Amino acid sequence: MTIEDIQNEIIDEFSMFEDWEERYQYMIDLGKELPLINHQYKTDNNIIKGCQSKVWVHAEMDDDKLVFTADSDAIITKGIIAILIRAFSNQHPKDIIDADTSFIDKIGLKEHLSPTRANGLVSMVKQLKMYAIAYQTQLK
Amino acid sequence: MLNVENIRKDFPILSRKVNGKPLVYFDNAATSQTPQQVINAIVNYYSNYNANIHRGVHTLSQEATDLYEESRKKIQAHFNAKFSHEIIFTSGTTHSINLVANGFSSSLKKGDNIIVSALEHHSNIVPWQMLCERTGATLNVIPMNNEGELVMTAYDKLLSKNTKLVFCNHISNALGTINPIETIIEKAHAVGAAVLIDGAQACPHLKPDVQALNVDFYVTSAHKMCGPTGVGMLYGKEAWLKKLPPYQGGGEMIAEVTFEKTTYADLPHKFEAGTPNIAGGIVFGTAIDYMNSIGFEAIANYENDLLQYATKKLLDIEGLKIYGTSKQKTSVLSFNLEGIHPYDVGSILDKLGIAVRTGHHCAQPIMDFYKIPGTVRASFAFYNTKAEIDILAEGIKKAKMMLS
């Protein structure tokens, strides 16, 4: 599936929720389900510091696709990470670079990507793209 | 007794909705809300008096200058400073602290030490760290105990004849602890050190008397006490302010300028370079009038009642831990739910229309002490109610249910 297909799938899933509570409960459940990152990668090097919650991101190539793993100390943040990873991981670096991120607005989680939240997510999206740019350069 | 129903009518923002719910504003330690009287004063200034001050011969400029200087006198009276020129208008507490830190740059040297408390906000740590880097002086810290109180026996040991400056907040922003500043000041003076007290968190709750405290510098921001953002004050004893060099150069702060030499203006203008926040300065006085019209004793009693009620109510929630349990504290409750990140709790409360602060509150050393990433902080003002605290308690229970 392309990034766009996955994003549309996520938008469809979220459109079924009636209110913020259902949406948040889903995020929280996603957050609980996943150990998202191998413990050895949860290092200071991979940390994105926010004033509120921390995010760890690790990237590695699997063949010609870029695979992300990540984690956070806050569960709602973790839920959003799970969604971002679902959308962007296991894709070609070039597609990740070109990908649009406005689907986050469409699923009603925009406030978590606002810089004022300082939860590391804004930087995380940037970081995913930076990794993609770095690996894309290597591929060439 | 406060008539809270009437007081709430003064604050238009308190009747708005957030996420479809009536706003419950419990982030007062970050900034207080603004009463209509203060909003009107801002509008009145720009509608009728807007002009640059201290330099025009025209009537508007004279009127604006008079209002600005009247406000300075109001602030002087409120804090009981000896002279109005001991009140310096600044952009806020952080600016005030930096002004003093900069002023000591040339007089500190290697071997000197300065003391800060473990309860400080970053704005009362970083300027002094920078000062130490510039001068070679060392920075010592008064430790805190588990209740969030300063360990005064440790303070005694840190003081020496090499101590030049002591800095401490009057009240901790993260925990609400009221520090024993009278003792801190007295002991610092006994070794010849000067003391700066950061009053940003204290001024919304009590009325400091700078002469009775015998403090050398006292700083605060207007926006914590119903005033606008971007304006605050530095109180300094006349002798100190005369001794310190100016912080910034520019217009207003000079007596005479030639390319060879500039002589500085007298106090307070020496520290007020450039066009100041005129409206803010004037309205700072209006905010002080407003708070005095309610009365600080009534405010303190009412807020203490809210604090006791909220403490009891929140401690009923299983797994909730309060940080900062000093008997001497203001209406701040810093807490966490066991095993749940404060960001998650804050996010759910926001959805319920409840504004609290989450994170390290710019006081990372305190969070490190408790080995936590941060807390949820609910801070109450005189316009809050017990009914709102009930809403908070229900909100926390809901967050706990969703997040556990």
Image: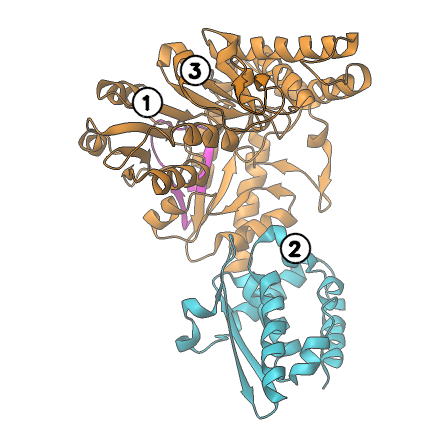
Residue B395: x and y in percent read 57, 46
What residue is at 34 percent from the left and 32 percent from the top? B326
The residue sitting at 37% across, 30% down in the picture is B106
Inter-mark Cα distance, 3 to 1 = 14 Å
Residue B260 sits in quarter: top right
Q: Depth-wise, is mark 2 or mark 1 nearer the camera? A: 1
Residue A130: tell me if it is visible: yes
- Disc 2/disc 1 C-alpha distance (Å): 43 Å
Image coordinates of residue B114 in percent, x first then y, are 30, 33
Q: Is residue B161 left or right of residue B134?
A: left
The residue pinned by badge 1 equals B194
Instruction: Return the residue found at the far front.
Output: B260
Q: Which chain is rendered cyan in the image?
A: A
> In the drawing, what numbered circle is on residue B242?
3
Sequence-first tag of 3 and 1? 1
Range of residues picked out in magenta: B315-334
Chain B representation colour: orange
Look at the numbered disc 2 and give the secondary structure of its residue. loop
Question: How many residues crowd mark 2 within 10 Å: few (<14), some (14–19), many (20+)?
Answer: few
Choose between B268 and B211: the one closer to the eye.
B268
Tell me where residue B375 appears, x and y as whole percent: 45, 47
Name the residue type under label 2.
Ser
Mark 3 belongs to which amino acid? Answer: Lys
**Chain for mark 1?**
B
> Image check: B186 left or right of B48?
left
For the stretch drawn in magenta, the main secondary structure is loop
Q: Which residue is mark 2?
A: A114
Q: Is residue A38 magenta?
A: no
Q: How is the image coloured?
A: by chain
Front residue of B203 and B162? B162
Dot 3: what SS?
helix
